[in-house]
Image: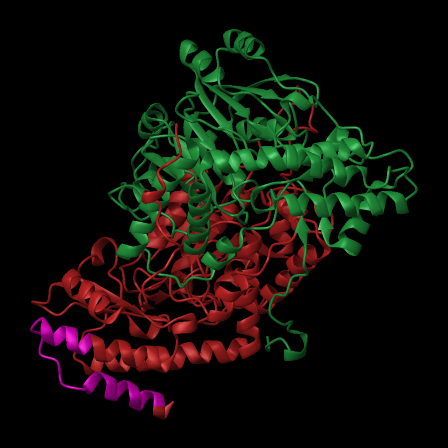
Chain colours: A red, B green
Amino acid sequence: MTDQPLSTIPGPIDPPRRLLMGPGPVDAYPGVLRAMSAPLVGQYDPFMTATMTETQELYRGVWGTTNDATLLIDGTSRAGIEAAILSLIRPGDRVLVPIFGRFGHLLAEISERALAEVHTIETEWGQVFTPSAIEEAVVRVKPTLLTLVQGDTSTTMLQPLDEIGEICARHGVLFYSDATASLGGNPFEADAWGLDAATAGLQKCLGGPSGSAPITLSDRAVEVISSRKKVEAGIREPGDPSSPDFVRSNYFDLGMILDYWGPRRLNHHTEATSMLYAARECARLLLLEGRDAVIARHRRVGAAMLAGVEAMGLRVFGDVSHKMSNVVAVYIPEGVPGDTARAAMLEDFGIEIGTSFGPLHGKVWRIGTMGYNARPDAALQTLVALEAVLRRFGAAVPSGAGVDAASDALAGS
Amino acid sequence: MTDQPLSTIPGPIDPPRRLLMGPGPVDAYPGVLRAMSAPLVGQYDPFMTATMTETQELYRGVWGTTNDATLLIDGTSRAGIEAAILSLIRPGDRVLVPIFGRFGHLLAEISERALAEVHTIETEWGQVFTPSAIEEAVVRVKPTLLTLVQGDTSTTMLQPLDEIGEICARHGVLFYSDATASLGGNPFEADAWGLDAATAGLQKCLGGPSGSAPITLSDRAVEVISSRKKVEAGIREPGDPSSPDFVRSNYFDLGMILDYWGPRRLNHHTEATSMLYAARECARLLLLEGRDAVIARHRRVGAAMLAGVEAMGLRVFGDVSHKMSNVVAVYIPEGVPGDTARAAMLEDFGIEIGTSFGPLHGKVWRIGTMGYNARPDAALQTLVALEAVLRRFGAAVPSGAGVDAASDALAGS
């Protein structure tokens, strides 16, 4: 093969200007983008290992935990989910998955791939579960592991977790939560709520790019993981029997990953240095502003966006009292072509809003205010653009009502 | 929990100046670091999908293939390996792994985790396999899949692959190669050599950060993958039987990943945008300089480094005629404390060189000249610093011999 002719080679990456107001990914904090252009260092450079340790401490602050086992998985948020589930359950173990949106289905899917005996309970999209509904299922199913999404962007709902850990502890069940969409924009207290494992991604309220999955594990979870440890091939003798308990993945074997992040620094993967820098900066910026302050900013800007869309006459989807603060879903007004209007938002105003999945596909738009974009100016720009686009597509929208209501909410809060 | 006190929060990332001349990761090209600080766009933004498509075409040029299924796995290089192996074999399938270094053991390890029946053949570290040795094992084992490292940094050896594809085709065996350490710095011809699957990472000769794994799959490999397709939970009915053939991972299910990268753009993970930008820039810079020119540059600078260390009186490890062009291993001279001298290189000169694994740990140093650092100035700086450090630790080193020999090699080549 000869080299590809030079004429077909494109220039350096040059993305168009966007304001990402969908359900995520959203614009990264400028500091996070800068961090990723920092020079690389070696895998065992003292600066590298110190940065890994520092990042662990920063994420303890983000998760609300003293868990020693607080680290990053090198992959997108579902890499973190799979690492947690694969390492905590053995084939045949019972897993309980309460499903209130698309990402509950994903937890069930990943558990099935791990050959778990998967039991699900479902509630209508737009609702969440009561603690007693979950306890009833726990008692009936007697699972090894309860997996529960905290914030499901597909429905915008935020499942209360604060009473669930106590239920799990009482029944001897491991408790895992996927906080990808919610962490940083809504309260999360890994220790106070009794989580055994929790994972997230950077691309929502943490204001970074997809590609690194923060994870935290309780001592109890680490015990389970340690009990299944398998020595990496090359040390193990060829004739040795394989324990039926080993994790069915090398990449997601948390036992080995913990050895890499821990004081032994046993080689596993080569840590993704630039994503580590990004993850560190996401946590650093959050703690610098103050975790509670960041959550309050999400609440304030999210409330303004909610007030704005309601004042425009848009009907909000789901049980608003359980909505995540960082995203709202509104029904697409009758007669408005959803995808075409969304494309006009993007092409004419450079603003991205989202559609949804499954039963909500084509029926609602999802508008996010998260991470760097949980800002008053971002919310107000989106509302004025949306009003213009809705009017262009024939919807009767009270002039200026959305932006006025949002401004009032911001002024009053 | 209250917010972490401000006083404990560190400043923005600020790595020390390093010249990374170990076996990788190495310094990224400045253009790659710049690419990662480009703003994000939405997951289905026309710019995003166009960038994904463009990156696929760029990597076809890097791999030497017309494979439609040429894409990235979101994770480090071993994520690519695991995706390839998990998707190509079923539990119980026979996998043949010729092992000539640490990363052969990794291929066996990953195959065992995938519940394959793993058969290995081994050769002494520092050697490679003849095609006939591999064919003999293929005939004896009758594997479904042959997995073979191309360049194993643990020994610096480059396994010739050009005759292996034909052997596999003749015996109906799928042929996978891990080209993490070699791709971009040594010839690789996915189509001409009959590869069914090959994976790599960015952090070696491609000159990017770890965290994205380029992969290419032949039509035959895609057929195998398609035959095991499993519909994602949420669409499948709860009572349906699970086919025993489904891939035991959601994250690494190439069937779903191909649907995400393909024209259907079915949602799977959220593509790691900044790593995509980095991977795109790695391939772009390689093709801009010219693939053959980049390989020639690695050969030229690698030969200069080899001449330099030999002229310094250092004994080179392994069969030099099968050495990768981008890394050389030298025995640590007797009486020189290996780790202390390596630390002096790092602390006093800011230059990183590597040790090795297993039987070579503490016995050899590995010096890389790869990607951005496959440059004459980087090689010469390393040689003068190494001479100074060796002398300080009492080794008898002919003054200036290393740098002179390397300069001569560069001038003559």
Residues A347 and A241: in front is A347
Task: Identify whether A331 is placed above or below A243.
Answer: below
Residue B34 seen in the current view: yes
**Secondary structure that dominates the magenta span:** helix
Residue A381 lies left or right of residue B63; in this view the side is left
Residue B42, percent across and down? 33, 60
Which of the two residues, A313 or A268, is positioned nearer the viewer here? Answer: A268
Q: How many callouts does the rendering have? A: 0
- Dividing the picture into quadrants, the one containing residue B136 is top right
In front here: A350 or A356?
A350
Task: Say above or below: A185 vs B181.
Answer: below
Q: Quadrant of residue A9?
A: top left
Residue depicted at x 58% and y 26%: B108
Q: Is residue B289 left or right of residue A87?
A: left
- Residue B183's x, y, as percent? 51, 34
Quarter of the picture containing the C terminus of chain B is top right
* In the rendered image, the vertical position of residue B264 relative to residue A284, given as above or below: above
Q: What x and y, as percent, mark residue A202? A: 47, 61
Q: Is residue B243 magenta?
A: no
- The answer to which image quadrant residue B309 occupies is top right
Provide residue B146's location: percent of width, then percent of height.
50, 20
At x 42%, y 41%, the residue is B287
Name the side, left or right, on which A88 lies relative to A363.
right
The span shown in magenta is A386-410
> In this view of the protein, can residue A196 be seen by the observer?
no
Instruction: Give left or right: position of B105 versus A323.
Output: right
Quadrant position of the N terminus of chain B in the picture:
bottom right
